[in-house]
Image (tube, helix red, strand yellow):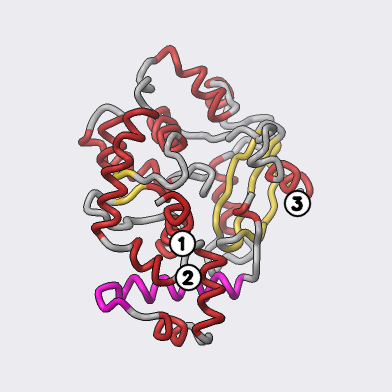
């Protein structure tokens, strides 16, 4: 899977710095030379580096940040949501099926807080920075990008232990590589997620959004039954423990703004730029 095609952390940090620079100066429309100079590279070298990481040129990326483009994407994605979520997720009889399909857990497993599960973990270098990955024999339980001040993932692992208090944790890079290596194949692993019924509904709705599509928090709340739940939807999105695979980066503000992201706005913008470039 493209996400795990990692290059150096230094390159990602340079691209992230360039994204922050472009976002802050969007109205001034900075040119290639100005952005390259900001990150200490020649224009030619910077252009190649940026395209490799973000999937688009710096000029194209700047265009994707405009409110007009974002609003068009939001309008286009309304029909995606209508189609993908037409069956609804509100029926109580679907609770067991929902847990098994998305989580690989039964409601009983959930109540026992993962008792008996073995979570194997490793810190991986990905295309968008280092991340802590968690897997079990039943699926992927977590993918969390690491903060700059947590390079070895100690804090991220401590948080995972709090979320899975009855599970056993084992460092096992080989098992993690083997599980994640199946992503994008017919034998792709399930997603083993723990959360309230509402959060599970939000995460499943995100999985219905195809690559290259986006929606607003309000539109997602409306499709889940109540447009006044936009704040609760935002909270559920912010609690998503599996970056990229549960694509919370595809949700924007209603005005076309980027909005927050658990693992940083620069990373969200890079992910969106890469996806939108291939599907616009």
The numbered disc on residue 134 is none
- Up the image or down, 255 lies above or below 9; here it is above
Pair 1/2: label in front: 1
Task: Name the spot of residue 80 as percent of width and height, x first.
Answer: 36, 35
Q: Residue at coordinates 65% horizontally, 35% vertically from top-left?
A: 189
Q: Main secondary structure of the magenta part?
A: helix
User: Would you say 82 lies left or right of 5 here?
Assistant: left
Task: Name the spot of residue 221 as percent of width and height, x first.
Answer: 28, 35
The numbered disc on residue 173 is 3
Task: Write the start and end of the magenta stretch as one range.
Answer: 9-29
The numbered disc on residue 16 is 2
Q: Secondary structure at mark 3?
A: helix
Measure the C-alpha gap from mark 1 to mark 2.
8 Å
* Of pointers 3 and 2, the one earlier in the residue sequence: 2
Q: Residue at coordinates 27% horizontally, 50% vertically from top-left?
A: 72
Measure the C-alpha gap from mark 3 to mark 2.
27 Å
Could you say which is closer to the camera, residue 274 or residue 192? 274
* Of pointers 3 and 1, the one earlier in the residue sequence: 3
């Amino acid at each position: 899977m493209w996400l795990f095609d990692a290059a150096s952390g230094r390159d990602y940090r340079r691209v992230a710095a360039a994204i922050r620079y472009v976002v802050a100066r969007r109205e001034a429309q900075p040119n290639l030379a100005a952005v390259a100079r900001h990150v200490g590279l020649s224009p030619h070298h910077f252009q190649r580096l940026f395209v490799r990481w973000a999937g688009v040129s710096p000029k194209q990326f700047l265009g994707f940040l405009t409110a007009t483009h974002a609003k068009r994407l939001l309008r286009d994605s309304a029909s995606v949501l209508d189609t993908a979520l037409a069956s609804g997720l509100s029926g109580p009889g679907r609770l067991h099926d929902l847990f098994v399909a998305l989580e690989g857990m039964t409601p009983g497993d959930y109540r026992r807080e993962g008792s008996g599960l073995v979570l194997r973990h490793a810190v991986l270098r990905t295309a968008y920075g280092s991340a802590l990955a968690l897997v079990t024999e039943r699926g992927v339980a977590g993918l969390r990008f690491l903060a700059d001040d947590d390079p070895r993932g100690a804090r991220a692992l401590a948080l995972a232990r709090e979320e899975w208090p009855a599970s056993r944790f084992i460092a096992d890079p080989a098992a993690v590589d083997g599980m994640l290596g199946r992503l994008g194949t017919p034998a792709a692993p399930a997603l083993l997620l723990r959360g309230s019924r509402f959060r599970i509904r939000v995460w499943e709705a995100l999985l219905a959004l195809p690559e290259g599509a986006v929606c607003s928090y309000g539109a997602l709340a409306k499709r889940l039954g109540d447009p006044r739940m936009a704040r609760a939807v935002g909270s559920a999105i912010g609690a998503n423990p599996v970056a990229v695979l549960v694509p919370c980066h595809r949700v924007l503000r209603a005005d076309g703004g980027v909005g927050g992201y658990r693992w940083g706005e620069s990373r969200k913008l890079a992910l969106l730029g890469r996806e939108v470039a291939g599907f616009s």
